[in-house]
Amino acid sequence: MINYLVVCLAVVLIGALYSEADARARGLGIIGSAHDFTYDASSSGTVNEWNSTGVAGTYWDSGDGEACRVCHVPHDQGGSAWYSWDGEDAGLLWNHSLSNTDVYGMYGSDSLRGEIGANVAGKSKLCLSCHDGTVAINAFDDQQGTGGFGNDGVAEADRVWIQDYASAFEIGPGRSVADDNFLMGNHPISVAYAEGFFTQNPKVGMNGGLHAPEGRTFGNLVKMRGAPTVDMVLEQGMVQCHSCHDVHDSPGVTAIGTALNRAGQGLAANSGSDPSGLCLSCHAK
């Protein structure tokens, strides 16, 4: 009887874990994913009330409650273009305040063979505009500023932070973005994988190093049809946040039951599962 109760409890706990994971990544598109900020007045607690449309007493009463508009806008109405590489306009019709953090403490290791930039570059800066915890999520559209505490266009009382979401991932929690080791506890970003922005990594194609990125698929190809190859998700030859994470929870690209990963790490309920599948998509171990 005791063994039966233990098994039942384990099943319940595992089911709860998968329910939480599935809410983050379902491989069904952005609606319903962790990046869906659509206002929902029908739910308990009115989900994403800050992104409501004309609801009396709410902060955001001029928006459209859209899922996409928090990050992108079809017409920027004279807003500042986002520039990524040496003044080159990177497009994406970006609609959210960027962090005003000038320099991030980058990852470092004696075993690191790929060159790493002196600072975060490319589209990872867009991810950090929410995930470094210094810019309010609702600092978008006409509430944009230059980013940072007290300077993002959103009144203090109305700010919504990524820290307010129980299952959200804040980069470097408990650390200041000014710390030299702010990104030290995370997989390196803006780091050279192969020939591109920096010198070619000498460990590419070597046992114990990295797989050659061209044509290298993520995780289990049979279960992840349509998934991009590693070289397709590098930016200027560099690993960035979107190299591992599919921010739009795209069908056939995001591994179900993960933190928007492009491949699973071994979850039994994961349709793209391989043991450490995401890691071994790149690392030749």
Image (cartoon, rainbow, N blue to C red):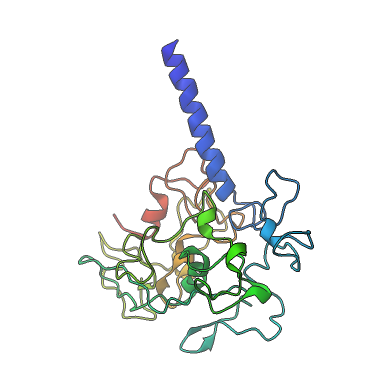
Q: Is residue 260 visible?
A: no
Q: State whether residue 249 is above or below residue 243.
A: above
**Figure check: 223 above or below 177:** above
Tell me if residue 98 comes above or below residue 263 in the rendering: below
Pick the residue in front: 194 or 61.
Answer: 61
Residue depicted at 54% across the width and 42% down the height: 20
**How far from the left and from the top, in percent, is residue 46?**
70, 49
User: In the figure, is residue 149 to the left or right of 61?
Assistant: left
Q: Is residue 43 left or right of residue 89?
A: right
In percent of the image, x 36 and y 62: which residue is there?
175
Q: Quadrant of the C terminus?
A: bottom left
Q: Position of residue 24 (x, y in %)?
A: 56, 50
Q: In the rendered image, which quarter contains the N terminus? A: top left
Q: Residue furthest top?
A: 1
Which residue is farthest bottom?
87
Which residue extends farthest left? 110
- Is 185 in front, or is 261? 185
Give whichever of 10, 115 is nearer the camera: 10
Q: Where is residue 3 shown, x and y percent of the image?
A: 42, 15
Q: Is residue 142 visible?
A: yes
Task: Identify the residue at horizontal 46%, vertical 88% (top origin).
Answer: 86
Q: Position of residue 118 (x, y in %)?
A: 33, 79
